[in-house]
Image (cartoon, helix red, strand yellow):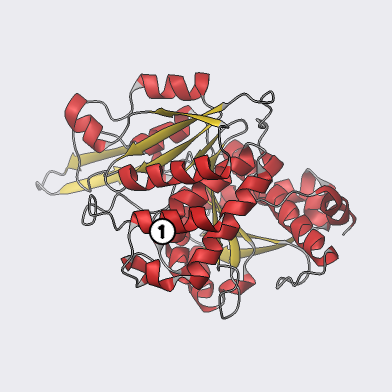
Amino acid sequence: MATLQRLAASVQIGAIGSLTSRAFASAAGSKSTIGLIPADGIGREVIPAARDVLEAVAPNKFNFVHLDAGFEHFQKTGVALPDETVERLKGECAGALFGAVSSPSHKVAGYSSPIVALRKKMDLYANVRPVASPVGATGTPIDMLIIRENTECLYIKSERLETLPDGTKIAWADRKITETASKRIGRMAFRMALQRGAIREARRARGETVAWEGKPRVTVVHKSNVLSVSDGLFRESVLSVRNGEDKAFKDDVDLEEQLVDSMVYRMFREPHKFDVAVAPNLYGDIISDGAAALVGSLGVVASANVGDSFVLGEPVHGSAPDIAGRGIANPVAAIRSAALLLEHMGLDAEATRIHSAVDKVLSEQAAILTPDLGGKGTTRGVTDAVIKAL
């Protein structure tokens, strides 16, 4: 536990924190630029809400630039992700927020998901999703971190359709798993597990109650009993990181493995027994969306697309066309995603204030919550309550 104790002496509270290399290091009085990509549907409602909270928690610290992307932009221009958006993110922005995308469930000629493309173009290889009960909530506390490999698996979108001699069709999809990407995501999982362990040690030292007992734990999610080549490579690569790179990964972090179907079962039966889970792209997408049900709804779960030098905050929910424009979209996931972005930028105190304000609103102001949480509130009402709770 020596590594955890050393980390605890200087730890900053956060889900991402020091794990990315671009820190908020602007000169005093200068502003940092954040890209805002509302995209489709309720993204155009929750991203402005997140911006309002950012301006309230850190007045005069940011410039904001509006950037285009999305299916609706594709319908207007034939381009889902303009080159200008990527160029400005790379050249001007310290980080960004993405709203939601209305990717159709059927094939549309020339269209490809802009968020998937952004992850590849910006090399945002990890999708990091904290799933936690609000502070003060009743019941056994949940505090999971799901880390999803963000660039490979079936999401490389290499598909083809063939017609057989009898006239029936057959669809093929290629699945890509590389040792390099699997080790990279495994490395991040173990580093974040160490950081979470250090945070717990720091809290215990301050006399706070911490539910998790023992070392931090990484759960490797796969299906290598069936997909022995592709999932087998993912599993072996992550295990090799633990066994061969940093002594602390093995000495100070526990390890377990879960087949993905078993993971889903156990996650719903005993979510409090999971700390950090790491998975290939498709599995990570499914289990992290499912985990949102454990803490209320998709409307409260944040995520961050993380690379070595850039973070793109992204609420987990979709574009919700059934409620778009009605002013009742839950802004909490977008606001929490903004807090994750601030952690990346080195503004840990401001990020903590946002997380605390959101927890306070969720646990104490049920009457103003949005319909997805059983309330009759509005996007504006929840946003104003969070700002007031800051």
Q: Residue furthest right?
A: 2
Horizontal relation, residue 305 to residue 43: left or right: right
Image: 30 above or below 376: above
Q: Which residue is mark 1?
A: 382
Residue 280 appears anywhere in the view: no
The residue positioned 62% from the left and 39% from the top of the image is 344
Question: Could you say which is closer to the camera, residue 129 or residue 279?
Answer: 129
Residue 184, quarter of picture: top right
The residue positioned 29% from the left and 44% from the top of the image is 172
Residue 45 appears anywhere in the view: yes
Question: Residue 22 placed where, x, y %?
Answer: 65, 30
The residue positioned 52% from the left and 26% from the top of the image is 93
Quadrant (top left/top right/bottom left/bottom right) for the N terminus: bottom right
Question: Could you say which is closer to the camera, residue 52 or residue 99?
Answer: 52
Horizontal relation, residue 347 to residue 363: left or right: right
Image: 53 above or below 287: above
Three-letter amino acid code of the residue under disc 1: Val
The residue positioned 83% from the left and 55% from the top of the image is 4
Question: Could you say which is closer to the camera, residue 123 or residue 364?
Answer: 364
Horizontal relation, residue 327 to residue 185: left or right: left
Question: Residue 340 placed where, x, y %?
Answer: 57, 46
Residue 218, quarter of picture: bottom right
Quadrant (top left/top right/bottom left/bottom right) for the C terminus: bottom right
Question: Residue 373 placed where, x, y %?
Answer: 38, 69
